[in-house]
Structure formats: structure tokens, C-alpha cells
Image (spheres, helix red, strand yellow):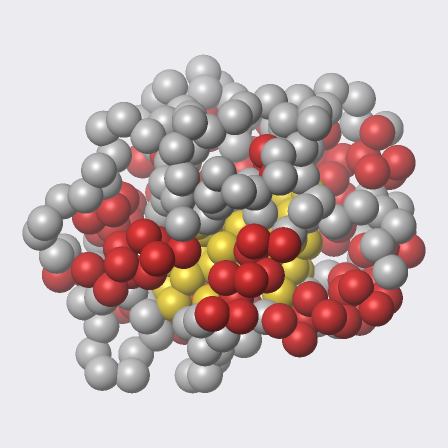
Amino acid sequence: MENAEVDSIATPRQGVVRMDCHAHVFTRACRLAPDRRYTPAYEAPLASYLAVLDHHDMSHGALVQPSFLGTDNGYLLDCLGRAPDRLRGVVVVAPEVSDHELDAMAAAGVVGIRLNLIGLEDPAEVARHYDRVLLRKIATRGWHVEIHATGAVFAAALDRALSSDAQVVVDHFGRPDSHAGADDPGFRALLSLADNPLLWVKLSAPYRFARDPGPIASALLEAFGGDRLLWGSDWPWTQHETGHDYGACLRWLEGWIPDPEQRRRVLGQNAARLYRLAGG
């Protein structure tokens, strides 16, 4: 899975933040969600992920709760406790999660919740899954709401999250339709909101598209100017494990954002601001 070459794009100067904003960790001991769409046949433990970060001279990482673990964030929280200065967490919670639980997760290094709405077809269901009370709790804590959705559900989730005044992070380029690409209506709506200072987008998981993601990345760069774009490896590339390595993921970013200063912002300053790292 790994390429022995250390890409120069990933090599930081001493003390400079270089952050992978999207990765998943799990072991066979983790309790799987009963309604999961996917069951991994392998482990991706914290030690392996930290070794990958070290190999590519990445200073920090964001652990995102994978869908197949549901709302049991136990392993993610344990991992944050083992590398508190290096990791931040994005959890999946039930709408009825208590203030006490949220406060405990914040103390552990959690900075956001993920709305994983892949598979949801009715936009009206967004309100049932994530009511405004929960979103206000997220906003008052200074957390962000991370959206993973497609089509009309994506548009509904984006509107609801932004109305809460929380920071909003869109996963995987906004998941535009593979065939429509940059002409996807949901993606065009995302671009139209680029002036909203609460909105961020992750350049991650390009292999989930049938088309070259270059035009999509270019459109995002033109709209956002590099100031609220983030990069994530999506390690260990669940359901897309074959044929990917971390160095190649970093080199994709070099192709999408040719300007070195803009790349430094995406890998460093932007991530440091959103994830509350020193230097942000």
C-alpha cells in the first residue's frame, strides 16, 4: 500500500503544520454498526496511521469516525488520548447526545461531528437525523459539522448546517455526480456559497469519481481561493484500497494546486485554523 518515496510536497520545515484532514482508524475489536453498508476485512490501527504520517513528514492528522462503526466512537477517542498533541477527532453522534458527552469528547480532542448521509434519499429526512438543537450545541462549542452526502440530500444538509452558524466542512469535493462532474447542480450550489466564511471543502477521495477530478478541483480553487480548502488522504481508502498509496495522494494535490504557497495554506494554515492547532 505504501510507496517508499517521501514526496517533497509533504516535507515540512521544523515546527510547520502539515495536516492530513481525513483518515479512518479501526481494529477487529471495534463494535460494528448493525446497519452498516460495508464490513472491512482488515485492520487500520492507530500505530499504522502514525507510521504513515511519520514516513511522509506529516505533523498532524484528523481521525474521522467511519460509517461502519456508527455512533460508537470509543476507539477514535482512545486514539486521541494516545496522541493528543498530534490528532483531532470528528465523531458521529445520535441526535439525543447529551451535553456531558459532547463536553467529554471536546476535552479528548474532538472538534466536529460528521453527518454521513450517503444512502439517504429523502431530503426531508435530514431534519429528523440532525435537529437544530444538536446543531446549535455544535456551533456553541466552536465545532464544525462535516457533511458527506450527495444530490438533493447534500443540498438540504448544507442549508441546514449553515443555518446553525457552525463551521461546515464538505467531504470529498462535495461528492458531485460522477458523470455531471463540475456541472452537477449540487456542486454548482456549493460554489455559489464560497463567499460564506463558515464553509470549507476537503480535497479528498478523488478515486470515488468516474471522471478526472481536476476540473472540480480547479473550480473549487477559483471559488474559494485556497483559503478554506483542506486536504485529506482518506487513508486507508475503505472500499478503494487497491492501487493507492499515501505519496500518490499528496502528489495529486500538487497537480490540483500548482502554486506552492496555496498548497502550504491548504496543508498547513487552513487546517491549523479549523482544527485549533498551534500556529493557526
Question: Is residue 70 found left or right of 99 in the rendered image?
Answer: left
Q: Image quarter for residue 138?
A: bottom right
Q: At 27% from the left edge and 59% from the top edge, which residue is drawn?
A: 51
Seen from this angle, which residue lies furthest left? Answer: 5
Residue 196 is situated, as x and y percent measured from the top left of the image, at 64, 58
Seen from this angle, which residue lies furthest front? Answer: 29
Question: Is residue 103 found left or right of 184 in the rendered image?
Answer: right
Question: Is residue 40 found left or right of 102 in the rendered image?
Answer: left
Numbered marks: total:
0
Where 275 sits versus 20, above or below? below
Q: Image quarter for residue 122?
A: top right
Residue closest to the eye, 16 or 242: 242
Q: At 67% from the left edge and 39% from the top edge, which residue is drawn?
A: 70
Residue 238 is situated, as x and y percent measured from the top left of the image, at 42, 32
Residue 168 is situated, as x and y percent measured from the top left of the image, at 65, 55
Residue closest to the eye, 254 or 2: 2
Residue 261 is situated, as x and y percent measured from the top left of the image, at 27, 68
Question: Is residue 26 found left or right of 139 in the rendered image?
Answer: left
Q: Image quarter for residue 243?
A: top left
Where the N terminus falls, by quadrant? top left
Residue 131 visible in the picture: yes
Q: At 40% from the left edge and 39% from the top edge, which residue is drawn?
A: 43
Residue 260 visible in the picture: no
Q: At 64% from the left edge and 52% from the top edge, which residue is drawn?
A: 73
Residue closest to the eye, 206 or 38: 38
Where 142 sits versus 20, above or below? below
